[in-house]
Image (spheres, grey):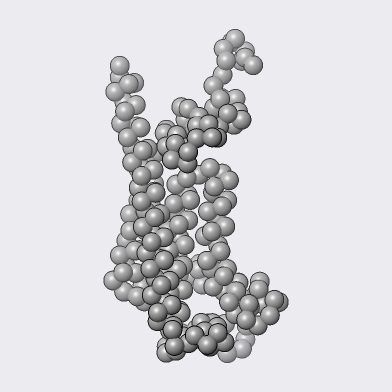
Amino acid sequence: MHDNHGQTPSPLARGDLSSGIVVAGRAAPEEASVLARAAAWAEGRNGWVRLPVLLWFLYILNGHLRDPDYQSLFGGLDLAIHEAGHLVFGWLGEFIGVAGGTIMQLAAPLIAAELFRRQRDFFAIAVAACWLSVNLFDVSRYAGDARAQALPLVSPTSGDPLHDWGYMLGRLGMLQDDTAIARGIRLAAILSMLAGLAAGGWLVWRMLRARSQAKPAAAA
């Protein structure tokens, strides 16, 4: 296939994705490792505009580590997703309906990560891992309050709000384990955030390194 000037256009100009992931400069074959594909994707992209996102999540992590009751700007969004989960899963029975808030809250960033994977946006996948961490911190706080039930609650209906984790752990005979369960979820939150920050940081480093190497080449 040739263009009007008799030259063979690049895969990027053709929009041909059959040979792999097309990026600004080169394509990574589909059979390449995830790291190789992520490195190829990072080339030609701007790391400076993505770095503040990682710094913001680092700030959020610090807030959660310093104060178990810390709430970030995600709080309102995650609460809305949580309450929607009760409505979505409510028709499956009382227990699943109550658990549906937590299920939906944790599923949302996982679904986002899958959508970003299909779009081959590696940095957005790292961001989704950080978002999952924020939700896990929130779930940990809720689970640890199962016996004390000191947190203010809201309800998607007009009835009195039900403490999800107090109900679920009570039904499972595990109410006495609420703080231990909360610690486990909190550990998962920390690991998810660290994984997202590490992956995002590596991608930003690859972007910045590629740009710095491209400048001397352009000057030559």
Name the residue rendered at 57%, 57% in the picture.
111
Q: Judge whether 212 appears above or below 51 on screen.
A: above
Residue 43, image x, y percentages? 41, 33
Query: Quarter-wise, where is residue 211 in the image?
Result: top left
Q: Residue at x 63, y 78 (%)?
A: 97
Task: Give x and y (percent) for residue 23.
Answer: 49, 32
Q: Is residue 83 visible?
A: no
**Is 145 situated above or below 139?**
below
Quarter where residue 70 is shown: bottom left
Residue most toward the right?
91
Location of the C terminus by quadrant is top left
Left or right: 205 as drawn, with respect to 150? left
Residue at position x 59%, y 9% from top? 6
The answer to which quarter of the image holds residue 172 is bottom right
Left or right of 97, for residue 214: left
Instruction: Give the farthest residue toward the top.
Output: 6
Tell which of 49 and 134 is nearer to you: 134
Which residue is more in the foreground, 1 or 46? 1
The residue sitting at 35% across, 32% down in the picture is: 210
Q: Is residue 96 left or right of residue 65?
A: right
Viewer can see residue 103: yes
Could you tell me how many numbered marks the image carries? 0
Residue 54 drawn at (x, y percent): 36, 53
Split into 4 quadrants, where in the image is the N terminus? Answer: top right
Above or below for 128 versus 81 = above
From what the image shows, is residue 46 above or below residue 106?
above
Residue 34 point in image, percent of width and height: 47, 41
